[in-house]
């Protein structure tokens, strides 16, 4: 296992720290996005979302059951390719990347840090409303990472990572870790109420993220 820890210090350019966190979380979401290939509804929705993400295309991976993942700017993601987490303390962001392949760690780091590789999704005249929910989720992670550590909702100083981003028909299940504690949130823009809800977990941060996603 190759493990790399990189510290990004924005002391001289603190206004860029938020942009970095947002793009990093987007990249983490994309790196774990998948859909079962044999479920027609899930596969078609996955393909629709991927078509509206700049630099992305679907890639088929044959595990026990075939799954679609995302190929982003030449890097074909799977569960085993790269796992990443970050801890934010003010303008300092520590990112940990792990992979059994060293070259994937280097490529992920390049994608996360290169200004020309900013993650852009929701492209087109009529972007899928899922991207509006995802943006609210990403913004919530960024906002909570700036709260005082004493706040129960705060992500400051806590290790945050995305474990899985699964497409289930027309919904998206986001599995994320906060200091090792698993939370699962469902995003579904097709629902009239509760477009975001917690499926598993009881952390205050997860509750705050769901509230943000319901504020549209």
Image: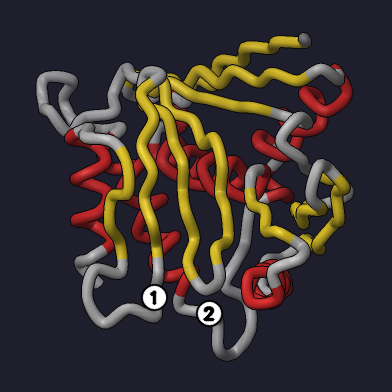
Residue 153 position within the rendered picture, expressed as x and y whole percent measured from the top left: 17, 34
Which residue is rendered at x = 47% and y = 67% of the image?
171
Which residue is rendered at x = 88% and y = 23% of the image?
103
In the picture, the disc for residue 52 is none
Q: CA distance from mark 2 to mark 1?
A: 9 Å
Residue 117 position within the rendered picture, expressed as x and y whole percent measured from the top left: 72, 49
Q: Residues within 10 Å of mark 2 (few under 14, many from 20)?
A: some
Q: Is the N terminus in the top left, top right, bottom left or bottom right quadrant?
A: top right
Marks 2/1 in contact by CB < 8 Å: the verdict is: yes
Q: Give the farthest residue toward the front.
A: 64
Tell me where residue 158 sits by quadrant.
top left
Q: Nearer the viewer, residue 121 or 7?
A: 121
Residue 88 position within the rendered picture, expressed as x and y whole percent measured from the top left: 39, 23
Classify 169 as above or below 37: below
Residue 143 position within the rendered picture, expressed as x and y whole percent measured from the top left: 28, 43
Tag in front: 2 or 1: 1
Q: Nearer the viewer, residue 138 or 90?
A: 138
SS state under label 2: loop
Direction from residue 136 to residue 45 in the image, left or right? right
Classify 175 as above or below 170: above
The residue singled out by tag 1 in the image is 189
Q: Is the C terminus in the top left, top right, bottom left or bottom right quadrant?
A: bottom left
Tell me where residue 3 sits by quadrant.
top right
Q: Residues within 10 Å of mark 1 (few under 14, many from 20)?
A: some
Which residue is rendered at x = 76% and y = 29% of the image?
80
Q: Nearer the viewer, residue 92 or 125?
A: 125
The residue singled out by tag 2 in the image is 128
Classify 74 as above or below 96: below
Classify 107 as above or below 54: above
């Amino acid at each position: 296992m190759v493990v790399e820890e990189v510290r990004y210090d924005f002391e001289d350019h603190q206004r860029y720290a938020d942009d970095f966190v947002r793009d990093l979380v987007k990249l983490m979401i994309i790196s774990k996005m998948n859909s079962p290939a044999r479920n027609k509804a899930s596969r078609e929705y996955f393909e629709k979302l991927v078509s509206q993400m700049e630099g992305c295309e679907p890639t088929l991976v044959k595990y026990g059951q075939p799954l679609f993942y995302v190929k982003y700017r030449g890097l074909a993601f799977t569960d085993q390719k790269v796992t990443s987490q970050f801890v934010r303390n003010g303008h300092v962001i520590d990112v940990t990347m792990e992979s059994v392949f060293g070259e994937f760690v280097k490529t992920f780091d390049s994608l996360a840090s290169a200004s020309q590789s900013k993650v852009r999704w929701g492209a087109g005249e009529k972007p899928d409303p899922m991207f509006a929910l995802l943006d609210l989720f990403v913004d919530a992670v960024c906002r909570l990472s700036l709260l005082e550590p004493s706040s129960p909702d705060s992500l400051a100083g806590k290790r945050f990572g995305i474990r899985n981003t699964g497409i289930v028909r027309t919904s998206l299940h986001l599995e994320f870790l906060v200091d090792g504690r698993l939370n699962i949130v469902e995003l579904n823009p097709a629902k009239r109420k509760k477009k975001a809800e917690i499926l598993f977990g009881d952390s205050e941060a997860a509750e705050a993220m769901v509230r943000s996603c319901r504020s549209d």
